[in-house]
Amino acid sequence: MKINFSLFNTGLGNNGGSQSIVRSANTLTKLGHVVNIIDSGKNQYTWDKLLCNHIIIKDMNAVPDADVIIATGFKSVSPTMSLPDRCGLKCLWIRGWELWKMNEQEIVDKILKTHTVKFVNGIGLFEKLKSYNVDSFLVRPGTDFDDFKPLNQRSNRKYVVLGGLFHFKHKTKRTEWILDTAQGLKKRLGDGSVKLWMFGTNGDPFLSVINKYVQQPIMKEKNDFYNGVDIWLSPSMLEGLHIVPQEAMLTECCVLTTETPLSGTRDYIQDQVTGSVSKDNIFAFVKNTENLIKNPMLRDHLGKRGREQVLRLGNREDNMKRLVGLLEGLLSGTIKYNYN
């Protein structure tokens, strides 16, 4: 199959969204498909080697023929829609509710009403589209099972390590919740009882509440990092499928999230079964964190069940094979899509 990923006006950079596209494209290439990433600018992604073609388009007539073309961001939808039929079935893989790009009504008018087959990467987005009477197919990218494994390093410590993602570019990540939670519990339980580890793309913020900070850890560093964390704090409120908590869970780290509809964790965290879910306010979040700190047996149980659940979601190859099956069904007409 010939598959083009459209990154017009979005591009590739060192971020989770780009990593998901690159690793999906690489997996499809390994499976024997002809894959192109169609872009309007230079590839600035350096975390992995890109195995497929990256084509910078100056003239829209130069877009290669394909069976399908998949827009990957809201800004890529309009130029993708302008392409001729020879470029393939027009699809849109919604991986985030991009309110940082356009407001809600613009998303409805400019994105949801387009004549594209909609894929979403998580349950929250599936329900979000359904609230506007828009159908979609659930297409997860899969996780890298080989990169993240438990190292059995969490026992026999006199303190509990909280972990979190440091990210202030988008306030919806709610990094301040993580900082405030750690600060408050250090005061209540004693600074020696609670540590905070964080990583991010930015340099060290040099905040006293953070005991350890790693900038852009390589894969082994990240696996070691997660294995050193007892409770991963994930308060983010505007995600599609949140990848970072899944990585932590693969090391049997217990994850705390919230019940916000777009937490990005609903696909794999069930409260008190595969993780912990708090009410969507900072007071409940702190209380749930404290409860997990005081219950090591619960953390251990949820960590182990959490890893099992992420494994059940499938790796990248499993999920890309499902995507190909879906695309083949759409092209042959055996799978129907209601364009509304």
Image (tube, grey):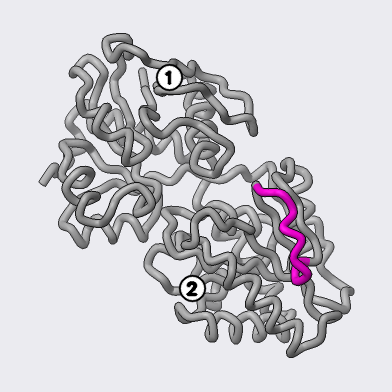
Q: Which mark is first along the chain, 2 or 1?
A: 1
Image spot of residue 11 (x, y percent): 45, 31
Picture residue at 66% right of the left edge, 49% below the top: 202
Picture residue at 71% right of the left edge, 70% below the top: 162
Q: Nearer the viewer, residue 282 or 30?
A: 282
Disc 1: which residue: 36
Q: Nearer the viewer, residue 44 or 227?
A: 44
Highlighted range, magenta: 202-210
Looking at the picture, which amino acid does disc 2 mark? Thr
Image spot of residue 150 (x, y percent): 75, 56
Disc 2: which residue: 258
Is residue 204 magenta-colored?
A: yes
Instruction: Please tell me how crowded label 1 is: few (under 14), some (14-19), or many (20+) other residues with Cα within 10 Å.
Output: many
Task: Check disc 2 and report its element: helix, strand or loop.
Answer: strand
Rendered position, 270 above or below 245:
below
Is residue 304 magenta-colored?
A: no
